[in-house]
Amino acid sequence: MVADDATGLKKVQLRSSAGSSAEVFLHGAHVTSWKDNSGQEQIFVSKQAVFKPPKAIRGGVPVCFPQFGDMGPVKAQHGFARNSEFTLVNATTDSVKLSLNPTKEQRQGNFPDHALFVKVTVGDNTLTEELEVINSTEAESPLKFTAALHTYFRISDISQTHVQGLSGLQYLDNMQNRQEGTDEAQVISIAGEIDRIYVKAPDHLKIVDKKGSKVISIHKTNFPDAVVWNPWVEKAKGMADFGDEEYKEMICVEAALATSGPVELAAGKSWVGTQLFKTSKL
Ligand code: TA6
Protein backbone atom coordinates (compact mmCIF):
# COMPACT_ATOMS: atom_id res chain seq x y z
CA MET A 1 0.00 0.00 0.00
CA VAL A 2 1.08 3.61 -0.42
CA ALA A 3 2.46 5.13 2.79
CA ASP A 4 3.91 8.50 3.77
CA ASP A 5 7.60 8.10 4.44
CA ALA A 6 9.35 10.07 7.20
CA THR A 7 10.81 12.20 4.40
CA GLY A 8 7.28 13.27 3.44
CA LEU A 9 7.48 11.43 0.12
CA LYS A 10 5.12 8.60 -0.81
CA LYS A 11 6.36 5.03 -0.96
CA VAL A 12 4.96 1.54 -1.42
CA GLN A 13 5.98 -1.24 0.99
CA LEU A 14 6.11 -4.83 -0.33
CA ARG A 15 6.37 -8.12 1.55
CA SER A 16 6.54 -11.70 0.29
CA SER A 17 5.08 -14.75 2.04
CA ALA A 18 8.71 -15.98 2.41
CA GLY A 19 9.55 -12.91 4.50
CA SER A 20 11.46 -10.70 2.06
CA SER A 21 10.44 -7.05 1.74
CA ALA A 22 11.08 -3.94 -0.33
CA GLU A 23 10.23 -0.23 -0.51
CA VAL A 24 9.62 1.76 -3.68
CA PHE A 25 9.20 5.54 -3.75
CA LEU A 26 6.76 7.04 -6.25
CA HIS A 27 9.48 9.64 -6.85
CA GLY A 28 11.50 8.10 -9.63
CA ALA A 29 9.86 4.67 -9.09
CA HIS A 30 12.93 4.37 -6.90
CA VAL A 31 13.59 1.13 -5.01
CA THR A 32 15.30 2.12 -1.74
CA SER A 33 15.20 -1.14 0.19
CA TRP A 34 15.18 -4.88 -0.45
CA LYS A 35 15.56 -7.20 2.53
CA ASP A 36 15.85 -10.94 1.88
CA ASN A 37 13.99 -13.60 3.90
CA SER A 38 16.50 -13.18 6.76
CA GLY A 39 15.62 -9.49 6.99
CA GLN A 40 19.12 -8.43 5.87
CA GLU A 41 19.22 -5.22 3.79
CA GLN A 42 20.72 -5.82 0.31
CA ILE A 43 20.36 -2.29 -1.11
CA PHE A 44 22.60 0.69 -0.28
CA VAL A 45 21.15 4.16 0.22
CA SER A 46 23.49 6.92 1.36
CA LYS A 47 22.91 8.29 4.86
CA GLN A 48 23.29 11.69 3.16
CA ALA A 49 20.74 11.01 0.43
CA VAL A 50 18.46 13.98 -0.28
CA PHE A 51 14.74 13.13 -0.50
CA LYS A 52 13.71 16.36 -2.22
CA PRO A 53 12.27 16.05 -5.74
CA PRO A 54 13.29 16.48 -8.44
CA LYS A 55 16.72 15.47 -7.10
CA ALA A 56 17.34 11.73 -7.50
CA ILE A 57 17.81 9.67 -4.33
CA ARG A 58 21.47 8.69 -3.90
CA GLY A 59 21.53 4.91 -3.79
CA GLY A 60 18.79 2.33 -4.24
CA VAL A 61 17.90 1.62 -7.88
CA PRO A 62 17.75 4.84 -9.92
CA VAL A 63 15.79 4.30 -13.16
CA CYS A 64 18.00 5.70 -15.92
CA PHE A 65 15.68 6.57 -18.83
CA PRO A 66 15.47 7.70 -21.65
CA GLN A 67 19.24 7.50 -21.53
CA PHE A 68 22.15 6.05 -19.67
CA GLY A 69 24.64 8.77 -18.75
CA ASP A 70 24.97 11.14 -21.71
CA MET A 71 24.00 8.48 -24.27
CA GLY A 72 20.95 10.35 -25.57
CA PRO A 73 19.46 13.76 -26.47
CA VAL A 74 18.30 14.78 -22.99
CA LYS A 75 20.53 17.21 -21.12
CA ALA A 76 20.04 15.54 -17.70
CA GLN A 77 22.65 12.89 -16.87
CA HIS A 78 20.85 9.50 -16.87
CA GLY A 79 17.66 11.08 -18.30
CA PHE A 80 14.59 12.38 -16.43
CA ALA A 81 12.73 9.28 -15.12
CA ARG A 82 14.62 9.22 -11.80
CA ASN A 83 13.68 12.88 -11.25
CA SER A 84 9.96 12.40 -12.03
CA GLU A 85 6.89 11.51 -9.95
CA PHE A 86 5.38 8.19 -10.99
CA THR A 87 1.73 7.20 -10.57
CA LEU A 88 0.45 4.03 -8.90
CA VAL A 89 -1.11 1.66 -11.45
CA ASN A 90 -1.74 -1.24 -9.10
CA ALA A 91 -0.27 -2.91 -6.03
CA THR A 92 -0.57 -6.22 -4.20
CA THR A 93 1.17 -7.33 -1.01
CA ASP A 94 4.32 -8.38 -2.87
CA SER A 95 4.22 -6.35 -6.10
CA VAL A 96 3.69 -2.79 -7.39
CA LYS A 97 3.37 -1.27 -10.86
CA LEU A 98 4.05 2.43 -11.39
CA SER A 99 3.71 4.54 -14.54
CA LEU A 100 5.10 7.76 -15.95
CA ASN A 101 3.53 9.69 -18.83
CA PRO A 102 6.01 12.55 -18.86
CA THR A 103 4.75 16.03 -19.69
CA LYS A 104 6.38 18.00 -22.49
CA GLU A 105 8.28 19.92 -19.81
CA GLN A 106 9.49 16.68 -18.13
CA ARG A 107 10.52 15.44 -21.57
CA GLN A 108 12.63 18.58 -21.65
CA GLY A 109 10.85 19.72 -24.76
CA ASN A 110 12.47 17.48 -27.30
CA PHE A 111 12.01 13.87 -26.26
CA PRO A 112 9.00 12.21 -27.96
CA ASP A 113 5.86 11.16 -26.10
CA HIS A 114 5.79 7.63 -24.66
CA ALA A 115 4.63 5.61 -21.64
CA LEU A 116 7.00 4.17 -19.05
CA PHE A 117 6.17 1.47 -16.50
CA VAL A 118 8.21 0.08 -13.59
CA LYS A 119 7.10 -3.11 -11.86
CA VAL A 120 8.79 -4.35 -8.67
CA THR A 121 8.10 -7.73 -7.05
CA VAL A 122 9.57 -9.44 -3.98
CA GLY A 123 9.74 -13.25 -3.65
CA ASP A 124 11.70 -16.01 -1.94
CA ASN A 125 15.01 -14.16 -1.28
CA THR A 126 14.39 -12.35 -4.57
CA LEU A 127 13.68 -8.91 -5.98
CA THR A 128 12.51 -8.51 -9.58
CA GLU A 129 12.33 -5.17 -11.38
CA GLU A 130 10.85 -4.70 -14.84
CA LEU A 131 11.13 -1.59 -17.02
CA GLU A 132 8.60 -1.31 -19.88
CA VAL A 133 8.63 1.39 -22.57
CA ILE A 134 5.71 1.87 -24.97
CA ASN A 135 6.04 4.18 -27.95
CA SER A 136 2.99 6.28 -28.72
CA THR A 137 0.74 4.75 -31.38
CA GLU A 138 0.63 8.17 -33.11
CA ALA A 139 4.41 8.45 -33.14
CA GLU A 140 5.75 9.50 -36.54
CA SER A 141 9.17 7.98 -35.88
CA PRO A 142 10.72 5.23 -33.77
CA LEU A 143 11.46 6.05 -30.12
CA LYS A 144 15.23 5.90 -29.60
CA PHE A 145 16.52 5.31 -26.06
CA THR A 146 19.22 3.85 -23.88
CA ALA A 147 18.50 2.88 -20.26
CA ALA A 148 19.79 1.27 -17.08
CA LEU A 149 18.61 0.07 -13.69
CA HIS A 150 21.43 1.64 -11.68
CA THR A 151 21.47 -0.61 -8.61
CA TYR A 152 23.58 0.26 -5.55
CA PHE A 153 24.12 -3.02 -3.69
CA ARG A 154 24.96 -3.02 0.01
CA ILE A 155 28.06 -5.10 0.79
CA SER A 156 30.06 -5.62 3.98
CA ASP A 157 33.51 -4.54 2.76
CA ILE A 158 34.47 -3.49 -0.77
CA SER A 159 37.99 -4.86 -0.26
CA GLN A 160 36.50 -8.35 0.28
CA THR A 161 33.95 -8.19 -2.54
CA HIS A 162 34.24 -9.21 -6.19
CA VAL A 163 32.06 -9.51 -9.27
CA GLN A 164 31.89 -12.75 -11.28
CA GLY A 165 30.82 -13.17 -14.90
CA LEU A 166 32.63 -10.35 -16.69
CA SER A 167 35.98 -12.02 -17.30
CA GLY A 168 37.47 -11.59 -20.79
CA LEU A 169 34.88 -9.02 -21.83
CA GLN A 170 35.45 -5.77 -23.70
CA TYR A 171 34.62 -2.70 -21.62
CA LEU A 172 34.57 1.07 -22.07
CA ASP A 173 36.39 2.87 -19.29
CA ASN A 174 34.48 5.98 -18.19
CA MET A 175 37.61 7.08 -16.35
CA GLN A 176 39.59 7.08 -19.60
CA ASN A 177 37.18 8.82 -21.91
CA ARG A 178 35.45 5.52 -22.67
CA GLN A 179 38.65 4.03 -24.01
CA GLU A 180 38.22 0.34 -24.82
CA GLY A 181 39.81 -2.31 -22.61
CA THR A 182 39.49 -6.01 -21.97
CA ASP A 183 39.18 -7.47 -18.52
CA GLU A 184 41.33 -10.61 -18.36
CA ALA A 185 40.88 -11.10 -14.63
CA GLN A 186 38.84 -14.10 -13.54
CA VAL A 187 36.82 -11.88 -11.18
CA ILE A 188 36.61 -8.10 -10.72
CA SER A 189 38.03 -7.00 -7.39
CA ILE A 190 37.78 -3.34 -6.44
CA ALA A 191 40.88 -1.56 -5.14
CA GLY A 192 40.18 1.91 -6.45
CA GLU A 193 37.65 3.95 -8.44
CA ILE A 194 36.03 1.84 -11.15
CA ASP A 195 33.55 3.05 -13.76
CA ARG A 196 33.22 0.59 -16.65
CA ILE A 197 30.59 -0.29 -19.22
CA TYR A 198 30.99 -3.99 -20.03
CA VAL A 199 29.67 -4.50 -23.56
CA LYS A 200 27.43 -7.50 -24.36
CA ALA A 201 27.75 -8.82 -20.81
CA PRO A 202 26.31 -12.23 -19.85
CA ASP A 203 22.81 -12.12 -18.39
CA HIS A 204 23.96 -13.98 -15.27
CA LEU A 205 26.39 -12.17 -12.94
CA LYS A 206 27.31 -12.58 -9.28
CA ILE A 207 28.45 -10.27 -6.49
CA VAL A 208 30.44 -12.23 -3.89
CA ASP A 209 30.60 -10.51 -0.50
CA LYS A 210 33.17 -12.65 1.32
CA LYS A 211 33.05 -10.76 4.61
CA GLY A 212 29.28 -10.90 4.56
CA SER A 213 29.38 -14.60 3.53
CA LYS A 214 26.77 -13.90 0.87
CA VAL A 215 26.28 -14.04 -2.88
CA ILE A 216 23.86 -11.82 -4.77
CA SER A 217 22.99 -13.40 -8.11
CA ILE A 218 21.85 -11.05 -10.87
CA HIS A 219 19.84 -12.25 -13.87
CA LYS A 220 19.12 -9.53 -16.43
CA THR A 221 17.07 -9.77 -19.64
CA ASN A 222 17.14 -7.37 -22.61
CA PHE A 223 19.80 -5.24 -20.95
CA PRO A 224 22.82 -6.28 -23.06
CA ASP A 225 25.48 -4.37 -21.12
CA ALA A 226 26.56 -4.20 -17.47
CA VAL A 227 28.07 -1.22 -15.66
CA VAL A 228 30.34 -1.57 -12.62
CA TRP A 229 30.90 1.56 -10.55
CA ASN A 230 32.51 2.43 -7.25
CA PRO A 231 33.41 6.11 -6.67
CA TRP A 232 36.24 5.32 -4.20
CA VAL A 233 37.82 8.01 -2.03
CA GLU A 234 38.02 11.19 -4.13
CA LYS A 235 34.66 10.88 -5.92
CA ALA A 236 33.01 9.94 -2.61
CA LYS A 237 34.34 13.16 -1.07
CA GLY A 238 33.08 15.08 -4.09
CA MET A 239 29.44 14.01 -3.68
CA ALA A 240 27.50 16.02 -1.10
CA ASP A 241 24.82 13.31 -0.92
CA PHE A 242 27.31 10.50 -0.32
CA GLY A 243 29.39 9.88 2.83
CA ASP A 244 33.18 10.07 2.51
CA GLU A 245 33.56 6.49 3.81
CA GLU A 246 30.44 5.01 2.19
CA TYR A 247 32.31 3.71 -0.86
CA LYS A 248 33.45 0.86 1.40
CA GLU A 249 29.93 -0.55 1.79
CA MET A 250 28.47 -0.35 -1.71
CA ILE A 251 29.01 -1.45 -5.29
CA CYS A 252 26.95 -0.58 -8.35
CA VAL A 253 26.39 -3.42 -10.81
CA GLU A 254 23.90 -2.11 -13.33
CA ALA A 255 21.77 -3.83 -15.94
CA ALA A 256 22.24 -1.45 -18.86
CA LEU A 257 21.26 -0.80 -22.45
CA ALA A 258 24.17 1.53 -23.02
CA THR A 259 26.84 1.02 -25.67
CA SER A 260 24.75 -1.72 -27.28
CA GLY A 261 21.89 0.74 -27.73
CA PRO A 262 19.94 2.76 -28.58
CA VAL A 263 16.84 0.67 -29.14
CA GLU A 264 14.57 2.08 -31.88
CA LEU A 265 10.98 1.29 -30.92
CA ALA A 266 8.34 1.57 -33.66
CA ALA A 267 5.03 3.38 -33.02
CA GLY A 268 2.77 1.46 -30.67
CA LYS A 269 5.44 -1.16 -29.88
CA SER A 270 6.82 -1.98 -26.41
CA TRP A 271 10.21 -2.91 -25.01
CA VAL A 272 10.73 -4.72 -21.69
CA GLY A 273 13.96 -5.15 -19.73
CA THR A 274 14.19 -6.95 -16.39
CA GLN A 275 16.58 -7.71 -13.57
CA LEU A 276 16.14 -10.41 -10.92
CA PHE A 277 18.29 -10.53 -7.76
CA LYS A 278 18.58 -13.55 -5.45
CA THR A 279 20.64 -13.86 -2.26
CA SER A 280 22.31 -17.04 -1.08
CA LYS A 281 24.85 -18.04 1.55
CA LEU A 282 28.50 -18.18 0.42
O1 TA6 B 1 26.82 4.27 -13.68
C1 TA6 B 1 28.02 4.89 -13.38
C2 TA6 B 1 27.85 6.40 -13.57
O2 TA6 B 1 27.54 6.72 -14.90
C3 TA6 B 1 29.12 7.06 -13.07
O3 TA6 B 1 29.83 7.65 -14.15
C4 TA6 B 1 28.63 8.08 -12.05
O4 TA6 B 1 28.39 9.31 -12.69
C5 TA6 B 1 27.36 7.40 -11.56
O5 TA6 B 1 26.77 6.87 -12.75
C6 TA6 B 1 26.44 8.27 -10.75
O6 TA6 B 1 25.82 9.22 -11.57
P1 TA6 B 1 24.89 10.34 -10.85
O7 TA6 B 1 24.36 11.18 -11.96
O8 TA6 B 1 23.81 9.59 -10.11
O9 TA6 B 1 25.79 11.05 -9.88
Image: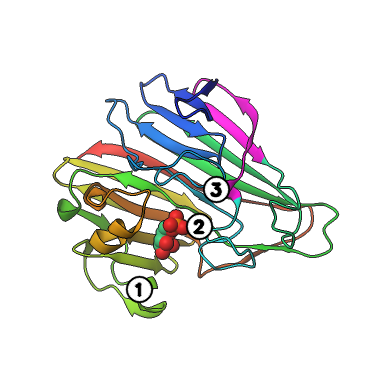
**Residue 185 placement: quadrant:** bottom left
Q: In the image, is 36 to the left or to the right of 268? A: left
- Camera-nearest residue between 230 and 236: 236
Q: Residue at x 44, y 25 (%)?
A: 6
Check the image and tell me how it is coloured. Answer: rainbow
Q: Residue at x 43, y 69 (%)?
A: 199
Instruction: Decide if ligand 1 comes within 8 Å of the CB at mark 3.
Output: yes
Which residue is identified by label 3?
82
Mark in the foreground, 3 or 2:
3
Distance in Å between CA atoms under marks 2 and 1: 22 Å
Magenta part of the chain = 81-99
Instruction: Residue 233 in the image: state x and y as whole percent.
Output: 23, 60
For badge 3, the amino acid type reads: Arg
Magenta span includes 88: yes
On the rendering, which quadrant does ligand 1 occupy? bottom left
Which residue is identified by label 2?
223
